[in-house]
């Protein structure tokens, strides 16, 4: 008789399984490292999160406040305000030299993250293969697995993280539908040249594939005003979906504004999911984005001036520690080679947390093709970076002493 509380609870246990693809999807490893931290947060230095520490530009913030004061606080068109899409279209014309119609080829999203998810869901059928370039930002694999597709990771460790056309071609099968590119890259900071991208474009055209180009770090480059994108290569428009956003270019992670640009036939399908999914991106954030991409269009340059000093300092300290890395030409990460310590990247990160109160991200969070490396984000104040590098040096000294202890 189900009269005791215990029996009633037993009867209420749900036995039907939830979605298999959701179960198969792993949580992002970037945040997993934080579970290893046992001390109070103020004792730790965390160089983990991919977020600019500097504020959103002033005029952009003001535009957000004005939107609230002016009661621009209702639903917008599902595609986003047409005025914002016009500005995005101009922005793309300037930085990509490609034309996208604001009426039907641009859609405003809730961050680039939603743009990735919408694109993958729109293009992919269960069983399709999607090529990811490893090491890869974790949200790609999550979106692909959720869609029931098979992620095929191209390991670029042997080519210093520069994807070659041969590597790409060898990963293609008859099931391949989509390639996801991300340059400037998270976690390596690699920027591919126009020539490298155009040879990748030839392979993508040869096999009739789609490409999603995640260009969120496009304006955070150290040697040029803007990184090249495969979207600008000839004859690519019909098969390319640009994912971009303001989180990184304008330090607007909390505003949640991104956008997609792609051929009309795709955007009109993506639009249907947007309608059912969130309706539209925040009206307030859209108004702020409009100012970010006009009045504050040069904001990324001010961030880069600050980041260049930080990057150069961090690289100099790594050189002094004799640690290897690939010099980042974009974004605000350095991917440090820790293979010489003979431990996994996860164990290295755990050791650094315990030994020196410093939190980095294990390379394997970016697929197995990131194993052997750790990611350090230098989007942090200089005084924090100085202390962080002292702590890293301490870890390196301890590990080096351990390694050679048997020789003494
Ligand atoms: C490569 C890459 N794409 C997309 C995103 C997500 O950006 P958003 O805040 O616009 O969703 C990130 C955030 O770290 C990223 O590194």
Image (cartoon, helix red, strand yellow):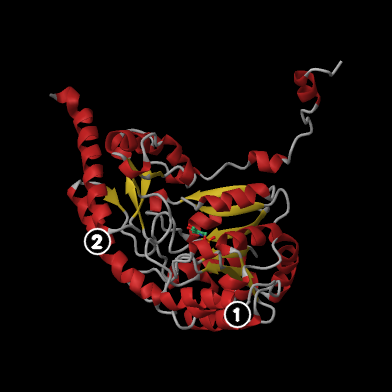
Quarter-wise, where is residue 193 in the image?
Answer: bottom left
Residue under the image location 69 percent in, 62 percent down: 278
Name of the residue lying farthest toward the top? 1
Task: Judge the density around disc 1: few (<14), some (14-19), many (≥20) Cα neighbours within 10 Å.
Answer: few
Q: Position of residue 10 (x, y in %)?
A: 77, 22
Q: Position of residue 179 (x, y in %)?
A: 58, 59
Task: Judge the density around disc 2: few (<14), some (14-19), many (≥20) Cα neighbours within 10 Å.
Answer: few
Residue under the image location 69 percent in, 43 percent down: 21
Which image quarter holds the C terminus?
top left
173 lies left or right of 33: right
Q: Earlier in the sequence, mark 2 or mark 1?
A: 1
Q: Is residue 36 above or below residue 140?
A: above
Q: Is residue 239 above or below residue 26?
A: below
**Disc 1 designates what residue?**
70
Q: Is residue 69 above or below residue 400?
A: below
Marks 2 and 1 in Cβ contact (< 8 Å): no
Q: Position of residue 332 (x, y in %)?
A: 37, 60
Q: Is mark 2 within 8 Å of ligand 1?
A: no
Q: Viewer-proximal residue, 344 or 85? A: 85
Q: Is residue 224 visible?
A: no
**Picture disc at residue 312:** 2
Please, what secondary structure does the residue beneath circle 1 have? loop
Q: Is mark 1 within 8 Å of ligand 1?
A: no
Q: Is residue 115 visible?
A: yes
**Picture disc at residue 270:** none
Which image quarter holds the N terminus?
top right
Name of the residue lying farthest toward the left? 408
Please, what secondary structure does the residue beneath circle 2 have? helix
346 lies left or right of 215: left
């Amino acid at each position: 008789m189900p009269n005791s509380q215990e029996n009633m609870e037993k009867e209420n246990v749900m036995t039907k399984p939830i979605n298999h693809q959701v179960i198969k999807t792993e949580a992002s490893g970037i945040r997993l490292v934080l579970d290893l931290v046992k001390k109070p947060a103020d004792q730790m230095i965390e160089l983990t999160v991919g977020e600019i520490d500097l504020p959103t530009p002033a005029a952009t913030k003001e535009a957000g406040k004005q939107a609230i004061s002016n009661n621009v606080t209702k639903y917008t068109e599902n595609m986003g305000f047409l005025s914002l899409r016009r500005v995005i279209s101009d922005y793309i014309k300037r930085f990509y030299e490609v034309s996208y119609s604001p009426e039907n080829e641009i859609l405003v999203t809730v961050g680039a993250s939603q743009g990735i998810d919408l694109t993958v869901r729109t293009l992919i059928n269960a069983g399709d293969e999607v090529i990811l370039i490893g090491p890869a930002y974790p949200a790609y694999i999550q979106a692909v697995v959720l869609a029931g597709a098979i992620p095929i990771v191209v390991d670029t460790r042997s080519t210093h993280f520069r994807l070659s056309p041969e590597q790409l071609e060898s990963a293609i099968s008859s099931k391949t539908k989509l390639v996801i590119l991300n340059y400037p890259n998270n976690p390596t900071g690699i920027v591919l040249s126009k020539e490298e991208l155009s040879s990748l474009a030839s392979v993508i055209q040869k096999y009739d594939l789609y490409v999603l180009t995640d260009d969120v770090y496009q304006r955070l480059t150290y040697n040029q005003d803007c990184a090249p994108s495969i979207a600008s290569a000839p004859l690519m428009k019909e098969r390319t979906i640009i994912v971009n956003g303001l989180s990184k270019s304008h330090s607007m992670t909390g505003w949640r504004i991104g956008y997609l640009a792609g051929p009309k036939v795709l955007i009109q399908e993506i639009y249907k999911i947007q309608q059912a999914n969130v309706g539209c991106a925040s009206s307030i954030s859209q108004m702020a984005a409009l100012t970010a991409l006009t009045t504050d269009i040069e904001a990324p340059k001010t961030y880069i001036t600050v980041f260049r000093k930080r990057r150069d300092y961090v690289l100099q300290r790594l050189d002094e520690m004799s640690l290897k890395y690939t010099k980042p030409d974009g974004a605000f990460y350095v991917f440090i080679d820790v293979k010489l310590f003979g431990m996994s990247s996860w164990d290295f990160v755990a050791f650094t947390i315990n030994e020196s109160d410093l939190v980095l991200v294990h390379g394997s969070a970016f697929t197995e093709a990131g194993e052997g490396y750790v990611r350090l984000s230098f989007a942090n104040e200089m005084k924090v970076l100085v202390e962080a590098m002292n702590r890293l040096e301490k870890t390196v000294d301890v590990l080096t002493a351990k390694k050679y202890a048997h020789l003494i």
